[in-house]
Each structure stands twice: as structure tokens, then as C-alpha cells.
């Protein structure tokens, strides 16, 4: 099973539980930075099998992603149990993403202000 799954495979995924940390990378095929970021995220995902990593192409996956507005690429959304723990642009650097994951991995509180479309996505992929 690949470490980084397509976002469309998240709903109903066997590893998707209320306790699972879910990371969605919002990217676009035409974005060179995103193409460079994908193998970085693959390595991070392979090294941390407890986290469910998904790749969302904002154009190809528009039906599931909905109206999530991404200002710049790559952007990451991190969820647990339908709660949005993080949403924003990320530097496409392995150590930066790892540090971000470490900082939110033990968080139980949702972000106080989250775009409605991101909250709706979290609800749609919730187990």
C-alpha cells in the first residue's frame, strides 16, 4: 500500500479512525513546487505509518475538495476526528513538515477560526 494515498481514497479508508491523524496536501499538477514536494511527503508518510497522508489535486479532486481556497502551494490540512488542527501553506521542506506534524500530533483542540470549506472537508472524510 502506498504511503501517500489519493484524497478520494480517504472516505471509508480502513486506517481512518476517530483517533487517526490525517494530513492532506493540497497541490496542483501544474505546480513545479508541488511536484518536487510529493516525494518529500512520500518519505515522511513512509516513515510515520500511524499518520494517514493524502494527496489532493485541487483540480482533479475538486468534487471532494469542494470550495477549499488555497492561496499558495503546497498547503496542508491536518485533521483528527473531524477537527481541523492545522490549515495553511507549508514550506516544502522535510524538516519543516516534520516539525509541524510533531507540534500538532498531540493537540486535541481544533483551530478557533477555520474556513468553512475546510471544516466541511473534515466532516466529509470523518469516519
Image (cartoon, rainbow, N blue to C red):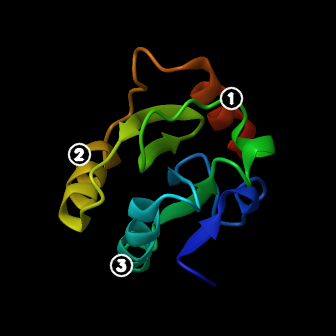
Q: Which residue was labeled with disc 3?
A: 47
Left/right placement of residue 114 relative to residue 100 reads right
Q: Is residue 74 above or below residue 98?
A: above
The structure residue drawn at horizontal position 35% and vertical position 73%, both measured from the top left corner, is 40
The structure residue drawn at horizontal position 25% and vertical position 53%, both measured from the top left corner, is 102
Left/right placement of residue 58 relative to residue 26 reads right
Residues under numbered marks 3 and 1 in contact, where contact means CB atoms less than 8 Å apart: no
Q: Which residue was labeled with disc 1?
A: 67
The quadrant holding residue 94 is bottom left
In the rendered image, residue 120, in percent from the top left (x then y), is placed at 68, 27
Residues under numbered marks 2 and 1 in contact, where contact means CB atoms less than 8 Å apart: no
Seen from the viewer's position, the closer of residues 91 and 114 is 91
Q: Which mark is residue 103?
A: 2
Q: Is label 3 or label 1 in front?
A: 1
* SS under mark 1: loop
In the rendered image, residue 93, in percent from the top left (x then y), is placed at 24, 62
Nearer-N-terminus badge (2/3)? 3
Mark 2 and mark 1: Cα distance apart in space: 27 Å
Q: Is residue 56 above or below residue 32?
A: above
Please tell me how crowded label 3 is: few (under 14), some (14-19), or many (20+) other residues with Cα within 10 Å.
Answer: few
In the rendered image, residue 69, in percent from the top left (x then y), is placed at 56, 30
The quadrant holding residue 9 is bottom right
The structure residue drawn at horizontal position 66% and vertical position 35%, both measured from the top left corner, is 121
Seen from the viewer's position, the closer of residues 85 and 96 is 96
Amino acid at each position: 500500500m502506498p504511503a501517500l494515498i489519493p484524497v478520494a481514497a480517504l472516505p471509508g479508508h480502513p486506517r481512518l479512525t476517530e483517533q487517526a491523524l490525517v494530513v492532506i496536501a493540497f497541490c496542483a499538477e501544474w505546480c513545479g513546487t508541488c511536484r518536487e514536494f510529493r516525494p518529500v511527503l512520500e518519505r515522511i508518510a513512509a516513515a510515520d505509518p500511524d499518520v494517514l497522508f493524502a494527496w489532493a489535486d485541487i483540480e482533479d479532486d475538486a468534487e471532494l475538495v469542494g470550495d477549499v481556497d488555497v492561496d499558495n502551494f503546497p498547503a496542508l490540512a491536518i485533521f483528527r476526528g473531524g477537527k481541523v488542527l492545522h490549515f495553511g501553506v507549508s514550506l516544502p521542506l522535510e524538516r519543516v513538515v516534520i516539525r509541524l506534524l510533531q507540534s500538532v500530533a498531540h493537540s486535541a483542540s481544533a483551530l478557533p477560526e477555520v474556513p468553512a470549506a475546510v471544516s466541511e472537508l473534515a466532516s466529509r472524510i470523518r469516519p
